[in-house]
Image (cartoon, rainbow, N blue to C red):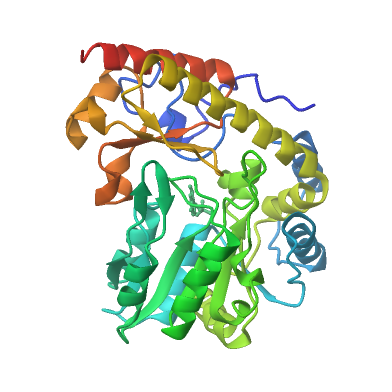
Amino acid sequence: MYDFTTPIDRTGTGSIKIDFAPEPVKGSGLVPLTIADQEFAVAPEIRAAVKEAADRGIFGYTYADEAYKKAVFGWMRTRHNWECSDYNLITTTGVVPALSLAVAAYTQPGDGVVIQPPVYMQFAHAININSRRIVENRLINNNGHYEMDFEDLEEKTKPDDVKLMLLCSPHNPVGRVWTREELKELGEICKKNNVLVIADEIHNDLLLDGAEHTVFASIPGMAENCVTCTAVSKTFNLAGLGCSNIIVKNDDIAKKLKEINGRFGSGLVPYFSRAATIAAYTKCSGWVDELNAAVGSNFRTLYDFVEKNLPMIKAIRAEGTYLAWLDMRALGLDNESLEKHMLANGLALDEGYVFGENGGGFERWNLALPKEQLLSALDRLKKAVDALL
Ligand SMILES: Cc1ncc(COP(=O)(O)O)c(C=O)c1O
C-alpha cells in the first residue's frame, strides 16, 4: 500500500502551483487545484532510482539507450497492449514542445490545424506560436457527456491546407477516454483527407472505473498516419524532470521530427529522467493502480458532495485523467466574475474559458490530492456558492 493521504509541503521548491499561487490562495492553508501535477509523493521505487543515480556522482549527457527504450516499449506492451518496439523513439523535454515540434515539422505558416475544444490550452498555443491557423472541431456536450462531432470533422478536414490534427486522448479537460470506435472514425476521416494525427496520450495511464485506453496508433491502418506522444510526467508525478517520448512508426515522419528537434540541440534524455523513467515503467505498475483508485475515490467524493449540497453545479463524469470538469454556468456569473469569486473564497481553479470559448462557465479541478485537501476545497466551494444565494 502506497501513501496517497499525507500532505507534502512544497513551499520554496519553485513549484508553479504552490510558490506562484495567486495571492488570496497562497498561504491560505489550501493548495491550488490548478496546474496538473499531483500532491502525492512520487513512488518510493522512483525516488530510490534517482537517489542511486545521484550517488554515482556524475550527471553527464545521456541518450535514450537500450535500457530506456526497453522500459518505454515494455510499458506500452504490457500496460497498453501496444507492440511498438521497432518504432522510432524521439525524446523531448515535454509533450508541449513535442506538439509545437510536430506543428512546425508538418505544416507551413497559414495551414490549418484541427483541435477539439474545450481542450488543453497549449494545443491552441502550439498552433498560434507557429503562425498556423486553428481549425475548431468543437466537442458536443450531450447532457454532460462529451462527444465528437464527426460530420463537422469531415467538413473541417476537407480543405487541402488543413494538414494536421492534435488529438487529446484521454481528453483534458472533459475526462473522456475515447472508445476504439470513436478513434477509428476520427482516424478514417483524417486519413481520407490527408490529415496527420498527433495523438497526445499523456493521460493514457490515468483511467477510472475500469475505463480502457485505446492507443490510437494500435488501431489497424492508423500507425502510418500518426505520431504518439507519451510521458511519465503526468502518471508518475515527474513533470519537473522534463522528459517525454514521441513514438512514430513511419520513418519519413520520424526523420522530419528528428531534424527539427536536432536544430535546437535536443534529443537527449536528462540524466535523472532516464533513471526515473526506467524505474517507473519497470517497477511501478502497482503504484499507478493505487493512484487511480485514490483519484477515483476523490471523484466520487466530489460527485456526492456536489449532488447533495450544490445541485446547481454539474460535475461531468470523468472516465480518465485526474481532472474534474465542473459546469458552473447556472451560477450566472461571467468568466471574470466567476474567477474572482472563487479566488476571493480561497479557491484557485483552472478557468474553463482558457480551454476554448465553449469552456466558459466551467472550472477544472485537479483531484490528484489527499482527500483531506479535497474536502477543504469542497467546503470553500459551498461557502462561495452560498454567498451568491
Ligand atoms: C493533454 C496534455 N498534454 C501535455 C501536457 C503537458 O505536457 P508536458 O509537461 O510534458 O509538456 C498536459 C499537462 O497537463 C496535458 O494535459
192 relative to 135, above or below: below
Looking at this view, is 267 or 325 the one in front? Answer: 325
- The image shows residue 182, relative to residue 43, as above or below, that is below
**Image spot of residue 382 (x, y percent):** 35, 14
- Say if residue 266 shows up in the picture: no
Q: Return the residue found at the far front.
A: 143
Q: Which image quarter is the N terminus in? A: top right
How many numbered callouts? 0
> Where does the image place residue 50, in percent across and percent down from the top left?
75, 43
Seen in the image, is 47 located left or right of residue 94?
right
Identify which residue, 54 or 73, lies in the foreground: 73
Q: x and y percent of residue 55 in the render?
A: 80, 43
The residue at 82%/51% (across/down) is 282
Q: Quadrant of residue 240?
A: top right
Residue 160 against residue 188 in the figure, above or below: below
Q: Residue at x 23, y 22 (%)?
A: 341
**On-image quarter of the C terminus:** top left
Please provide percent x and percent y for residue 167: 47, 63
The residue shown at (26%, 37%) is 361
Q: Can residue 13 be seen here?
A: yes
81 to the left or right of 137: right
- Left or right: residue 329 versus residue 48 is left
Vertical position of residue 136 compared to residue 333: above or below: below
Looking at the image, which residue is at 31% across and 74% down? 156
Q: Quadrant of residue 130?
A: bottom left
